[in-house]
Image (cartoon, helix red, strand yellow):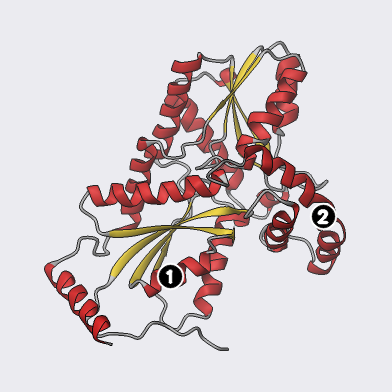
Amino acid sequence: MTFAPEPPYRHGSAQTTAVLLVNLGTPDAPTPAALRRYLAEFLWDPRVVEIPRVLWWLILNGVILRTRPAKSAAKYASIWTDAGSPLLHWSARQADCLQAALASRGHDVVVRHAMRYGQPALGTVLDTLQAQGATRVLVLPLYPQYAAATTASAFDAVAQWLMRSRRPPELRFVNRYHDHPGYIAALAASVRAHWARQGRGQKLVMSFHGVPARSLALGDPYHCECHKTARLLAEALGLPKDDWIVTFQSRLGRAKWLEPYTEPTVKRLAEQGIGRIDAICPGFAADNLETLEEIAMEAKDAFLGAGGERFEFIDCLNDRPDWIDALADLSLQHLQGWPLTPTAADDAQRQRALAMGASD
């Protein structure tokens, strides 16, 4: 095995701490070619699709990558902005805001964002952090609820990077934050703020990303953690049980996934005479295709088409100040014991390192 070259080691060089926010990923552009590259990487991950590789290779390359890219590209085009991908925009924004929040509390921590699939690639960002002197890295996947298909996959990518690293940094991982008080409080505040602007619907639909139903039997805690998040949010809002419901979206393939499915549920609510519903996606830290297109557009059309009168989508937390504060609290909880405030010795080491670099 060949290990990647590292920046030359300098005695006495300053050591820094970093937080790496990881999200799922996004294509580079809303085009069939870009979607084909992105889906090939995403859907080939054995954490995402757990069926025999040979069979899946035939399905993926013989069917899915021939038909799905064009359809997905059209969906991405409907949400693409001047800033590009909403997920990439909000992930970068969250990293900048988190670094500023930590700095305001007196902590010298570098914060960067990376994508599990697509760009900026997780391994590339780790390379950059190491080149910039990061010797301690907290990896924080932005998935509130743990799932093997998301959180564990991010850890897999880090492990693959470690296998080729000559001088890996100290590492810590955040597995979940589905019941973190600050996260729940920020969700509740976002719902109250939406209701203050738009009024309140008859039912709050909490839609989480789906996973195959068999993952529950295999020991994945995702289903339970989604329901705990929903219960805590409902309690924070003071909602009786009949005023809210948990659903699951984004089903892939014909296998049974976690139920109830979101779109059939909102249709049924309309058919039952519910005139207005509000929808929120607590499993996403930032708006993306699954929230802006699948829920705010497709689920809305399904509800209105079944006789509903009004469908309100509540934005993801994105860069809400209360969410950034919660993210800072969560980071500091897992950064305990690592030096976060520069000392005079650190500053002197930095100056010596800069001087040595200038003389080389």
Number of residue marks: 2
Q: Which mark is residue 228?
A: none
Specify few, some or many for label 1: CA neighbours under 10 Å numbering under 14, 14-19, or 20 or more. Answer: few
Q: Which quadrant is home to the N terminus?
A: bottom right
- Residue 303 lies, in percent from the top left, at 71, 21
Q: Is residue 36 at all visible to an observer of this figure?
A: yes
SS type, badge 2: helix
Quarter of the view holding residue 51: bottom right
* 132 left or right, relative to 241: left
Q: Is residue 143 at all visible to an observer of this figure?
A: no
Residue at image location 68% in from the left, 25% down from the top:
300
Residue named by callout 2: 64
Specify few, some or many for label 2: CA neighbours under 10 Å numbering under 14, 14-19, or 20 or more. Answer: some
**With respect to residue 260, does 23 lie above or below?**
below
Residue named by callout 1: 128
Residue at image location 42% in from the left, 83% down from the top:
6
Asked whether 110 or 205 is in front, the reply is 110
Residue at image location 66% in from the left, 60% down from the top:
47
- Residue 225 lies, in percent from the top left, at 54, 43
SS type, badge 1: helix
Asked whether 85 or 230 is in front, the reply is 85
- The amino acid type, in three-letter code, at marker 1 is Thr
Quarter of the view holding residue 17: bottom left
Q: Between disc 2 and disc 1, whose residue precedes?
A: 2
Front of the two marks 2 and 1: 1
- Residue 49 lies, in percent from the top left, at 73, 58
* 174 left or right, relative to 244: left
Q: Contact, CB < 8 Å: mark 2 with mark 1?
A: no
- The amino acid type, in three-letter code, at marker 2 is Ile
- Residue 344 lies, in percent from the top left, at 12, 68
